[in-house]
Image (cartoon, rainbow, N blue to C red):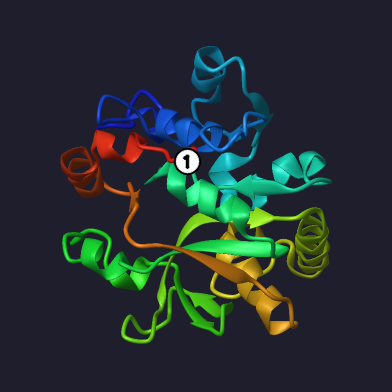
Amino acid sequence: MPTTEDSPKCFAEVGGQRILDWTLDAFRSSGIDDICFVGGYSMNTVEAEYPELTFRFNDNWPNNNVLASLFYAEDLMDRPFVCCYSDILFSPQVIGTLLDNSNDMTLVVDTKWSDRYAHRTQHPPDDAEKVVVRQGQVTRISRDIDPEEAYGEYIGVAKFSAAGARCLREHYHRLRRTYSGRPFRDAAVFEKAYKIHLFQEMLETGESFSHEDTDGEYIEIDTQEDFDYARKHWTTKHLVVNHG
């Protein structure tokens, strides 16, 4: 608020276009044009403006969170896919590099995350979805990681091969059967869990997540302060794509 009073956050304009347009540009620059938008709040507005997209409606959005919302598109997870949050800015290079990674499950990590947090008084480092890595593999993902121990911040973009997608779905449904309506990790109930809660659970059962890094080509827009920062620092240089 007040930016999102009458429209979804992804409609907020940065650098002359909506956050959602930056996202679509980043995907399409790497040849991804089969795109599903999962939403709840003000969904009809997005559908009217972007009829070329596929949509899945999270009809319980006031009572769930990003993990449950992602699985409204589960019917599309029988093939490789990339998922991302709708309130972030990232460069086309992030997607291009991610697609070159051949691992089954890969998270994009910002290694310069702490530089941005120096300007975020409303969203402290304790809120960052931080990761610890070792030899190319993510070993832990949590907000509780000490900033001094963090390798970087998970930016909300992840890629799954067909095998990785099956693995993700199997773990989600296993946990849902056990924890539905009950506390799960630090979520009040499973339905309020974040993606990182599922990822960490998977890591603890022996699953492997690789990481693909970006050195600052990313901004999260969670608060009005973030929005003002993005409008000042996100420029058209991020439209440059190397097709070579």
Count numbered badges in the picture: 1
Nearer to us in this view, 107 or 143: 107
Nearer to us in this view, 180 or 215: 215
Any part of residue 11 in sight? yes
Q: Is residue 229 left or right of residue 139?
A: left
Query: Looking at the image, which residue is at 39% across and 25% down?
Result: 7
Q: Circle 1: is it few (<14), some (14-19), or many (20+) Cα within 10 Å?
A: many
Q: Is residue 165 above or below residue 24?
A: below
Query: Looking at the image, which residue is at 35% across and 35% down?
Result: 239
Which residue reaches farthest front? 244
Q: Secondary structure at mark 1?
A: loop
Query: Looking at the image, which residue is at 67% across and 25% down?
Result: 54
Image quarter in which the N terminus is found: top left
Query: Looking at the image, which residue is at 69% across and 61% down?
Result: 102
Nearer to us in this view, 193 or 234: 234
Any part of residue 1 in sight? no
- Kindly identify the amino acid type of the residue bearing the numbered disc 1: Ser
Q: Position of residue 80 (x, y in %)?
A: 75, 48
Q: Which residue is mark 1?
A: 86
Toward which corner of the image does residue 143 lie, by quadrant?
bottom left
Q: Is residue 158 left or right of residue 89?
A: right
Q: Position of residue 19 (x, y in %)?
A: 38, 34
Toward which corner of the image does residue 105 lie, by quadrant?
bottom right
Q: Position of residue 193 (x, y in %)?
A: 59, 62
Q: Is residue 38 above or below residue 119?
A: above
Q: Position of residue 35 (x, y in %)?
A: 63, 32
